[in-house]
Amino acid sequence: MKIAVLGSGMVGNALATKLVNVGHQVMMGSRTSDSKPAQKWQTAAGKGTQIGTFAEAAAFGELVLNCTNGANSIVALRQAGEAKLCGKILIDVANPLDMSQKPPTLTICNTDSLGEQIQREFLETKVVKALNTVNCEVMVNPELAPGDHNLFICGNDTAAKAKVSEFIARNFGWKRDNIVDLGDISAARGTEMYLPLWLRLWGVVGSPHFNIRVIHE
């Protein structure tokens, strides 16, 4: 499959590398076609890789992953272009964190979410919020957090969510039964607002390789 990974930071790097390793063709998109971090990734990842602008990557990908800085994701996706995202599944991995604050704070919360803002702006794109509640290394290797633990997805398109769940299970090794569908895209408010707690837990645990498990009757 041809996959676009928008964003050349640690999250985009981890996801893009894993997807190349399991046999996909991956194009990493950045603000400029000669992004130094993207070039570094391509050199390390090797065959099956391309780099380009957000727009070039979005045009390339049959599936698009938004791994951009959440505070700037809307701008990045506008650069990718509505027409190039139309009809495609967009897995939104980003969290709207203001990294200038210590600890980081959310730029969107309570009555809205980044996932919802993306879906409102790109009406013909099937936005599925996923993978944003764990560290990027756990995203692609869930066994780093021992035992059974949960990943959450949400979105307005039921078929798209089913495809994303299967994609995550097949490519990243998550147990299908551990992926919890929270409903429509408004549930992104909850998964994004989990981040302040996640950051505090990281400080307590001393490692980002942890997750949570939902236990119920």
Image (cartoon, helix red, strand yellow):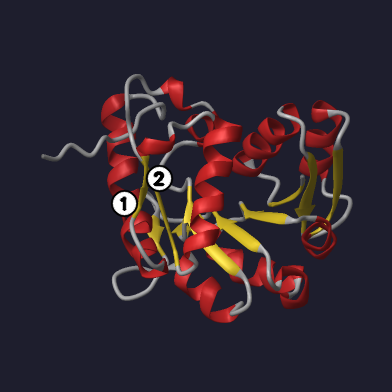
- Examine the rendering and report whether any part of residue 40 can be seen: yes
Instruction: Look at label 2 and name its amino acid.
Output: Thr
For the point 67% across and 31% down, the residue is 18
On screen, residue 23 above or below 132: above
Q: Is residue 28 above or below residue 129?
A: above
Residue extending furthest toward the left: 217
All told, the count of numbered labels is 2
Instruction: Give the residue number, with chain letter if any, for mark 2.
Output: 133
Is disc 2 placed on a helix, strand or loop?
A: loop
**Relative image position of residue 84 (x, y in whole percent):** 77, 70
Q: Which mark is residue 153?
A: none
- Would you call the spot at circle 2 few (<14 residues within 10 Å), some (14-19), or many (20 or more)? many
Residue sitting at x 75%, y 71%:
79
Instruction: Name the residue located 76 percent from the left edge and 76 percent from the top edge.
Output: 83
Give residue 127's quadrant in the image: bottom right
Work out which quarter of the rendered image holds the C terminus and state it: top left
For mark 1, what is the residue? 194
